[in-house]
Each structure stands twice: as C-alpha cells, then as structure tokens.
Image: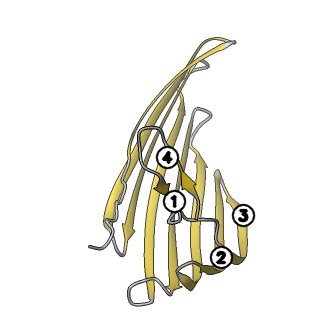
Amino acid sequence: GSRMNFPNTHDLDVTFLPADAANVQTRRGAGARVFAEVTAGNTRHVFDVTAFDVRRDYDDLFGGSSYAGNRLGFSWQATTDLSDALTLVYGADRMREDATYTNLSGGSTDTRTSGAYAQALWAVNGDIDVSATARVDDHSAFGTFTTGHVAAAYRPTDSLTIRAAAALSHSVTVAPPK
C-alpha cells in the first residue's frame, strides 16, 4: 500500500482508497417513430407511435447486473389557426414504460402516463406576442398533476426583444429505501 506523510501527523495508510476497477458497461438500444400528418381545413394533425428498447449490462466491483427497458408511446397533436393573430396547439399522449432490473426491488416495474395539453399563441400586434400553456398528466405511480406556462415578448425596436415568462411545474422526488 501507499503511505502519505503529512506534517504534524502520523503516516496515513491509504491502501483503502479505491482504484479504478475493471468496470464494464454494455449498452444496446433501438428506437423508431412512425407518424402521419393530416390537414383538415385550418387544422394540422400529427399522429405518431414511438417505441424504444434499451438493454444495459454492468460488471463492476459489486458484481454483475442487467437492465432491460421498453417504452411505447402514442400521441396526437393538432394546430389550428383561428386567425392571423391566434393559433391553438392541443393534443394528448400516452406512454407505457416497462423495466426489468436485477437491482430493482421485485425485479421489474411498469408505469403508464397519460397527458393532455393546450397552448394559445397570440400575436397581439407587430410588437407583442403572448402565449399560455396548460398540461395535465396522470402517472400510474405518482398521480395526477397539472403544469402551466405563460410568456410574453415585446419588441420595442427591431434590434431589441424583452421577454418574460412564468411557469408552474411538478417534480417527483423519490427517497431512497431505508
């Protein structure tokens, strides 16, 4: 082991200090998105399906572990121009996530999230834009929560834009097991 000598102290044995271990992580992933865009009158629709698959294998000082995750999502978004000054964007989505992990209590878990949102974009005049957004999500493990955002932009000159925004957010903190 190595020894360090510090003034006014005893020799310090540092054989306990961790060294780089032969940690190995193998990661494989694949994903895809299929979507369709449809215009009907003054509304543009986007429908999509997404899928993602990831696999990770770890080998470190504590042994080996593996993780496998799958995500499948469906969404729809519509954009409607109500006038030259007012546009609405709205939609809904649903996602399912499944995971198997050797270090996970019970070995596997799955969650579902469903959401809906709406946004209004308003060009008050050539100098002022305002937007407002609201979203509600229902998560199978954490419940239902609502978020929102309002923003404004003011252009007093061609070379200056003043922006302001305010938002409500939701965050889930998961405490480690005791």
| Label number found at residue 52 | 2
> Residue at image x 64%, y 61%?
45
Q: Amino acid at mark 1?
A: Val
Sequence-wise first label, 4 or 3? 3
Residue under circle 4?
A: 119
Taking the view exactly as shown, the residue that stands out farthest to the top is 157
The residue mark sitting in front, 4 or 2, is 2
Q: Quadrant of the N terminus?
A: bottom right
| CB under 8 Å between discs 4 and 3 | no
Tell me the residue at 39%/63% (across/down).
137
Instruction: Look at discs 1 and 3 and give the one toward the viewer.
Output: 1
Q: Amino acid at mark 3?
A: Glu
Task: Kindly identify which numbered label has been placed on residue 37.
Answer: 3
Amino acid type shown at disc 4: Gln
User: Quick one: label 1 or label 3, which is nearer the N terminus?
Assistant: 1
Sequence-first disc among 2 and 3: 3
| Residue 91: percent from left, percent from top | 52, 60
Q: Which residue is mark 1?
A: 14
